[in-house]
């Protein structure tokens, strides 16, 4: 049985230029494009000849020259009754000897197929196979690119507002997304061509391309903004342990330093409040409280209720509940406007917090119940100072 050469011989200069252009513009790998071409040629053969079982496509990766070979078995004579899809599998001995007189029955003859021999339909199918592969690879490239940005920040450009009542249409460069109303911050106003920073919540691969879910309300938007502004957060020296956020109004953030020489709160605030001010500006004035993280839940809760002063924290670690006693004049500050301060402190610490004034605690006998000897002198002095400041 004779052996045949597998050298690609068909010119591929134009094909090479087209592949290199697609590789550069679409960021699609050359191997994927060559695979698409190979599959398209096989599809064209199957459509044109009824089968591609005996067809092999050889492509030189460097030159992009290709060769399509139909391997036929030599028979004495072609069978008189044979299915259309079987006919391309055989060649008569007489025809084989016209190619090479040394061929004998049962030899395999490589017959080269020129792509120009394909019919219009077969050519159209081949073209569609290539285009489909290019679209798939393009979607895959975009998906992989944005999947790496999941749970991080991206910057987009506002295109249109209130798209079908579903939110803001935003261009991310290689693809578009929509910022739904549920993920918009109340009071923020954007206009077409505005740049907007978004937190990537999730990236999904769909038949229509990657679907990128973005948010302006997510707490981790604040985390990512501090990673951009604070080098100590970016390199891990300072850790953001917890964030509680009511988007557009206030955020509480607990930070911890892995280096005893670095103050975590000071690092996040920056000189003359420069770092925290940059984040506040990006969030259009949202207030940010930065507090020091502590593994002791009582101390953490006390810090979380800042700027309010705390007399005592009684924390139940098992039930995740805490009673917090504050001076009478600090009660409204500890609770906050419409309960916001204590609500955010509870989210930040994971504890259900019950705040009581010193007077309430004494009336309920909490100091005696827990065996605590607390004198109200300091609180009274602070109350007088606070009253004096208010009068001033």
Image (tube, rainbow, N blue to C red):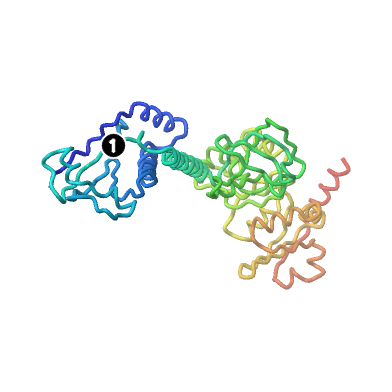
As drawn, which residue projects farthest toward the right?
391
Q: Residues within 10 Å of mark 1 (few under 14, many from 20)?
A: many
Query: Which one is nearer the viewer's eye here, 385 or 59?
Result: 59
Name which residue lies at 33% across and 29% down: 12
Looking at the rendered image, the quarter that the C terminus falls into is top right
As drawn, which residue projects farthest toward the front?
80
Residue 84 image point, x, y percent = 34, 51
Judge left or right: residue 107 versus residue 348.
left
Query: Which one is nearer the viewer's eye here, 59 or 217?
Result: 59
Name which residue lies at 78% across and 63% down: 356
Q: Could you tell me which secondary element the residue under label 1 belongs to? A: strand
Query: Which one is nearer the viewer's eye here, 56 or 347?
Result: 56
Label 1 sits on residue: 67
Residue 66 image point, x, y percent = 30, 35
Name which residue lies at 67% across and 36% down: 282
Number of dots carrying numbers: 1
Residue 193 image point, x, y percent = 68, 30
Whether residue 236 is visible, yes or no, is: no
Q: Quadrant of residue 17?
A: top left
Whether residue 168 is visible, yes or no, is: yes
Query: Which one is nearer the viewer's eye here, 327 or 344?
Result: 344
Q: Quadrant of residue 375?
A: bottom right
């Amino acid at each position: 049985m004779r052996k045949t050469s597998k050298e690609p011989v068909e010119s591929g200069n134009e094909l090479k230029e087209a592949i290199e252009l697609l590789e550069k513009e679409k960021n699609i790998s050359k191997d994927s494009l060559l695979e698409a071409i190979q599959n398209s040629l096989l599809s064209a053969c199957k459509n044109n000849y009824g089968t591609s079982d005996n067809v092999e496509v050889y492509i030189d990766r460097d030159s992009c020259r290709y060769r399509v070979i139909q391997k036929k078995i030599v028979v004495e004579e072609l069978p008189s009754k044979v299915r259309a899809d079987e006919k391309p599998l055989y060649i008569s001995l007489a025809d084989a000897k016209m190619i090479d007189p040394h061929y004998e029955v049962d030899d395999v003859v490589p017959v080269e197929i020129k792509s120009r021999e394909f019919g219009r339909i077969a050519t159209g199918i081949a073209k569609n196979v290539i285009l489909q592969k290019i679209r798939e690879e393009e979607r895959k490239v975009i998906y992989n690119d944005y999947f790496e940005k999941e749970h991080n920040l991206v910057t987009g450009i506002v295109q249109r507002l209130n798209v079908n009542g579903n939110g803001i249409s935003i261009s991310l460069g290689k693809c578009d997304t929509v910022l739904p109303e549920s993920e918009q911050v109340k009071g923020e106003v954007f206009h077409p061509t505005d740049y907007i920073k978004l937190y990537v919540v999730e990236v999904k691969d769909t038949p229509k391309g990657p679907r990128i879910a973005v948010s302006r309300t997510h707490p981790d938007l604040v985390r990512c903004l501090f990673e951009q502004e604070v080098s100590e957060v970016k390199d891990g020296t300072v850790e953001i342990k917890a964030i509680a956020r009511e988007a557009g109004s206030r955020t509480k953030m607990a930070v911890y330093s892995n280096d005893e020489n670095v103050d975590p709160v000071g690092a996040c605030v920056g000189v003359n409040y420069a770092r925290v001010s940059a984040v506040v500006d990006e969030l259009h004035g949202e207030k940010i409280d930065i507090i020091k993280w502590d593994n002791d839940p009582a101390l953490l809760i006390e810090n979380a209720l800042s700027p309010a002063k705390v007399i005592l924290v009684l924390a139940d670690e098992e039930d995740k509940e805490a009673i917090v006693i504050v001076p009478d004049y600090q009660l409204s500050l500890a609770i906050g406007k419409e309960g916001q301060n204590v609500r955010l402190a509870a989210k930040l610490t994971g504890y259900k917090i019950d705040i009581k004034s010193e007077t309430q605690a004494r009336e309920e006998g909490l100091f005696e119940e827990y065996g605590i000897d607390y004198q109200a002198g300091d609180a009274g002095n602070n109350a007088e100072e606070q009253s004096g400041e208010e009068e001033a």
